[in-house]
Amino acid sequence: MSGIAIVGASAITAVGLSLAETAASARARVARLREIDWMDRRFEPFIVGRVPDDGLPPLDDALATRGLTTREARLLRLAHVALEEALDGIDVAGELPLLLGLPEHHTTLPIDPPRFVQRLALQSGVALDVRTSVAVPAGRAAPLMALREAAARLTRGDARFVAVGGVDSLVDPYVLGTLDLEGRVRNEVTSDGLRPGEGAGMLVLCTAATAQAQALQPIAWLHGCMAGQEPGHIYAEEPYLGEGLAGVFERLFADTPPPAPVGCVYASFTGERYWAREYGVARLRHAAAFDPDHAIEHPAEVFGDLGAATGAVLAAIACDAVAEGYRQAPCLVFASSDHAERAAVLLTRQPS
């Protein structure tokens, strides 16, 4: 994985319409979680992290006539903003492969992944290589899982640039209602719960040679990435034994040892205790890999649970932290989906 550069990154969340705004708000712990008109089963308003409507572009006229669900239309607009920011100043010189994470929590009409990529190309105006693009409904971990595939494609020379991202919105009546019935939404009677959010994040990757040829300054370098499965996930009947994320850390540190102790961690915590316990197990089993004074960031506390956008947004914020020097590299970013998927990446300031 040596020499894989991240040359573009973006984020759109409730606390920022760009990566710079989102990263600054997350760093300052400036939350933007607000009541909405929709009520939970106790007839109390949901508190969510919602992107302002005026921060999104309109839906393309050609898509407005195709009977999209409200949720899919919103995801297309969110992803449009993220893709546009990530590609700013980059000439991809041809069609761009996109590896995209999509929601794992569905409404009554699930999103069709291939068709979503086609629609995103139309909505954004970006020349996406629909044939080689892949969208996977795998939740928070999906974008980090995709980074390994992106690195492999770039190393083989299959593409000059690859975009990796994620988009999701839990601010949907059906999704909110389902999570509420499961007792997973934080409110006055449920402290062990999440705050629903929405957003999108994108990363653009290339080899060191391509970055040099186009005079692109990498904002971070992909040192390593690994994915795995947790049999005891929160929807499983099997007991949680802490093998999933801990196994991902073990293989990541063995496959691509950090050049120095991990100085900062960006975690996909949602506010539910399960996730902190999971990280605690993984961290204790691999204590030697971490700086004793490492920082740990979990920005869902300011913008809510971003679902499938989580991995991409966390990685984008970590890139900003590494590039600006306000967090110590190497930086570990990990994300755990509600189902079995787990993934983690290591980001550095310099190529490995």
Image (cartoon, rainbow, N blue to C red):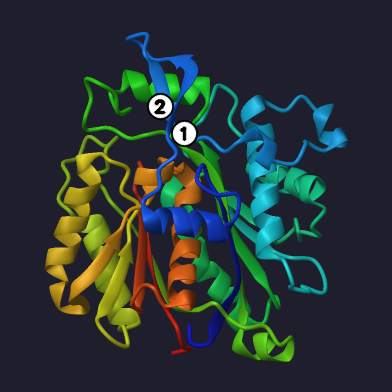
* Residue on which disc 2 sits: 47
Badge 1: residue crowd in 10 Å (few <14, some 14–19, many ≥20): many
Badge 2: residue crowd in 10 Å (few <14, some 14–19, many ≥20): many
Q: Residue at x 33, y 27 (%)?
A: 185
Q: Toward the viewer: 139 or 317?
A: 317
Question: Which residue in the rendered view is the most extreme toward the top?
Answer: 43
> With respect to residue 279, does 32 lie above or below?
above
- Of callouts 2 and 1, which one flags the residue occurring earlier in the amino acid sequence? 2
> In the image, 173: left or right of 99?
left
Local secondary structure at mark 1: loop
How far across and down, in percent of the image, does residue 5 sit?
56, 80
> In the image, 44: left or right of 2?
left
- Residue 6 visible? The answer is yes
How far across and down, in percent of the image, does residue 248 sit?
29, 65
Q: Toward the viewer: 200 or 178?
A: 200
Q: How many discs appear?
A: 2
Local secondary structure at mark 2: strand
How far across and down, in percent of the image, does residue 145 sit?
46, 61
Which quadrant of the structure image shows residue 318? bottom left
Q: Which mark is residue 105?
A: 1
Q: Residue at x 47, y 26 (%)?
A: 175
Which quadrant of the structure image shows residue 205? bottom right
The residue under label 1 is which amino acid type? His
How far across and down, in percent of the image, does residue 1 sit?
48, 82
